[in-house]
């Protein structure tokens, strides 16, 4: 289908993903579900994106544990996070758990932009659920990670998290 109808496959990756999923071809399905999620986000179809990226995570669970699988899961979780926040809120249990899981993965994989995004989401979730002391600790980790990455925008963003925590803690 992909080779016979490349325009259709490109325009509707969720259809191809569905067929790969049903054919028990998770590696191919994950890529298509991820593309479908990306398309949905571009169209502000956040519920749809959650479904597609969630399906990618389900397919990912069928693959054996490996560093590559963990990298893929981290990438999927930082993609699904903003859609969860848009539909459910940062304080929703699904958002909190998504960013907590992304952070656990990021801690094992090491420094990366995806790790920063995972920690940022986890910081937001901790703040939104009134876990201010935990959020302050996460803030310090964000600053350190941003500096190690040498990414000026991340350093600025991490410092924004610090002043928020200082304000909430009365410092």
Image (cartoon, rainbow, N blue to C red):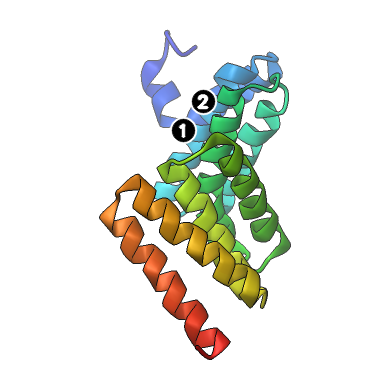
For the point 51% across and 34% down, which residue is it? 34
Q: Is residue 125 above or below residue 115?
A: below
Q: Residue furthest left?
A: 152
Residue 83: give x, y in percent of width and height. 53, 55
Mark 1 lies on residue: 35
State whether residue 53 is above or below residue 66.
below
Query: Label 2 neighbourhood size at 10 Å, few (<14), some (14-19), many (20+)?
Result: many
Badge 2 is on which residue?
31
Q: Which element type, helix, strand or loop, lies under badge 1?
A: helix
Q: Quadrant of residue 163?
A: bottom left
Whether residue 43 appears in this view of the structure is: no
Q: Nearer the viewer, residue 149 or 7?
A: 149
Name the foreground residue: 157 vs 166. Answer: 166
Q: Position of residue 18 (x, y in %)?
A: 62, 25
Residue 112: image quadrant is top left
Q: Quadrant of residue 94?
A: bottom right
- The answer, for residue 75, to whether it is visible in the render is yes
- Residue 95 in percent (x, y) is at 64, 58
Q: Secondary structure at mark 2?
A: helix
Spot the residue most to the bottom.
170
Report how far apart the C-alphas of labels 1 and 2 lie in the structure. Answer: 6 Å
């Amino acid at each position: 289908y992909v080779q016979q109808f490349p325009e259709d496959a490109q325009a509707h990756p969720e259809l191809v993903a569905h067929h790969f999923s049903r054919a028990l071809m998770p590696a191919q399905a994950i890529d298509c579900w991820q593309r479908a999620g990306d398309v949905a986000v571009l169209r502000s179809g956040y519920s749809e994106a959650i479904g597609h990226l969630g399906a990618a995570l389900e397919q990912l669970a069928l693959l054996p544990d490996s560093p590559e699988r963990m990298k893929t899961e981290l990438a999927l979780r930082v993609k699904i996070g903003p859609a969860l926040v848009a539909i459910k809120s940062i304080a929703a249990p699904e958002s909190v758990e998504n960013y907590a899981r992304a952070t656990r993965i990021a801690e094992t994989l090491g420094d990366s932009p995806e790790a920063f995004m995972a920690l940022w989401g986890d910081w937001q979730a901790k703040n939104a659920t009134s876990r201010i002391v935990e959020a302050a600790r996460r803030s310090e980790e964000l600053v350190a990670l941003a500096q190690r990455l040498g990414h000026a925008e991340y350093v600025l963003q991490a410092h924004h998290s610090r002043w928020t925590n200082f304000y909430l803690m009365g410092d």
